[in-house]
Image: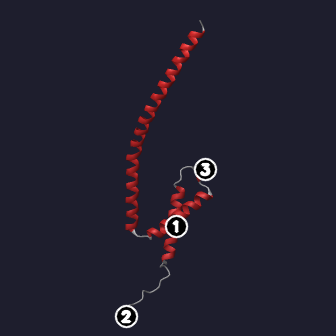
């Protein structure tokens, strides 16, 4: 036979632990918002909802937190490497487009200059 663990008044149920974890996550995320004007009830509810989902997924297990942190680190690396590359590509594309636009503007200016110099005579 298996012996039951004696019940003490200090033991918490899994539901209380998940609720506490959810509240801690919500308060941490909500107070991490740097713009004070963004702290509205709607943002609080969104933060609470996301924290509730994360608390259900993580279930208070260390390896789930580690997995989440590794995924966030991967996203951080992709963003840190990807944005400078996108910026360089967009800069080249815009530079080529502006060069073409500049050529068209110069050609139009030359036409107008010829037209006005011929009509003034």
Q: Is residue 110 left or right of residue 87?
A: right
* In the rendered image, the vertical position of residue 75 relative to residue 12, given as above or below: above
Q: Is residue 39 left or right of residue 2?
A: right
What is the spatial separation of the Cα atoms under label 1 and label 2, in whole angstroms? 38 Å
Question: Looking at this view, is 16 or 43 the one in front?
Answer: 43
* In the rendered image, the vertical position of residue 65 relative to residue 6, given as above or below: above
Quarter of the image where the N terminus is located: bottom left
* In the rendered image, the vertical position of residue 51 relative to residue 94, given as above or below: below
Q: Which residue is mark 1?
A: 52
Q: Are marks 2 and 3 in contact (CB under 8 Å)?
A: no
Q: Earlier in the sequence, mark 1 or mark 2?
A: 2
Residue at 48% over, 25% down: 102
Secondary structure type for disc 2? loop
x, y percentage for residue 72? Answer: 41, 57
Q: Which residue is mark 3?
A: 37
What is the spatial separation of the Cα atoms under label 1 and label 3, in whole angstroms? 24 Å
Quadrant of residue 58 in the image?
bottom left
What is the spatial separation of the Cα atoms under label 2 and label 3, in whole angstroms? 60 Å
Q: Are marks 1 and 3 in contact (CB under 8 Å)?
A: no
* In the rendered image, the vertical position of residue 66 relative to residue 120, given as above or below: below
Residue at 47% over, 83% down: 8
Quarter of the image where the C terminus is located: top right
The structure's colour scheme is secondary structure
Q: Which residue is mark 2?
A: 1
């Amino acid at each position: 036979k298996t012996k039951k663990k004696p019940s003490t008044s200090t033991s918490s149920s899994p539901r209380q632990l998940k609720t506490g974890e959810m509240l801690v996550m919500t308060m941490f995320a909500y107070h991490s918002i740097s713009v004070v004007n963004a702290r509205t009830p709607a943002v609080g509810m969104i933060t609470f909802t996301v924290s509730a989902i994360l608390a259900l997924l993580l279930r208070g297990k260390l390896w789930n937190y580690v997995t989440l942190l590794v995924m966030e680190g991967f996203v951080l690396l992709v963003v840190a490497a990807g944005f400078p590359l996108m910026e360089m590509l967009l800069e080249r594309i815009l530079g080529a487009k502006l060069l073409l636009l500049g050529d068209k503007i110069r050609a139009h200016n030359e036409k107008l200059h010829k037209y006005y110099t011929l009509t003034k005579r």
